[in-house]
Amino acid sequence: MLVVTRFRAPNPDPAAADELRDGLHRALAVLAEQRGYVGGEVGRNIDEPDLWVLSTRWSNVGSYRRALSSWEGKMHVQPLMVHALDEPSAYEVLRPGEAANEAVPRENG
């Protein structure tokens, strides 16, 4: 499973970008300690330097969700989500010839 979450720095001030970058690296370190974590990285957009990404890979969606709901996730990852763009972020990884999950909307209820 692949999670790609994009973040926008709160303002063009370089100090705000530095704070977001440090927070994303701290979040990555926290997530890396969680069960089911496979890998990840922090990046910054080349054309829009206030746009950042936290990309992580997980053995399954449950591992990712448990990592976010852990105490460490609540303290170090979730506070950054205020800067996250409101867009889908979880993707299934598809290898050649592998069947995809059935694409149906999930019900909230």
Image (spheres, rainbow, N blue to C red):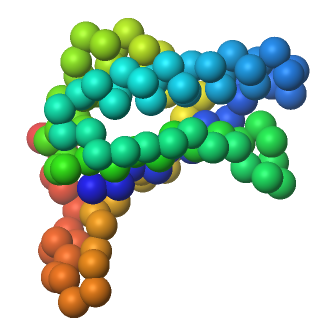
Q: Is residue 65 above or below residue 60?
A: above
From where the camera sits, is residue 78 visible?
no
Q: What is the x, y in percent for residue 27?
A: 45, 23
Quadrant of the image containing the C terminus: top left
Q: Give the left or right position of residue 93, taking residue 108 as reference.
A: right
At 27% across and 78% down in the image, what residue appears?
95
Quarter of the rendering occupied by the N terminus:
bottom left
Location of residue 31 (image quadrant): top left
In the foreground, 58 or 10: 58
Q: Position of residue 89 (x, y in %)?
A: 42, 50
16 with respect to 68 (left or right):
right
- Which residue corresponds to the image point at 75% horizontal and 25% vertical from the top-left? 17
- From where the camera sits, is residue 19 visible? yes
In the rendered image, residue 55, in percent from the top left (x then y), is placed at 47, 46
Q: Looking at this view, name the residue that lies furthest to the right.
A: 13
Residue at the (29%, 46%) spot, across then down? 38
Residue 20: percent from the left, percent from the top?
65, 23
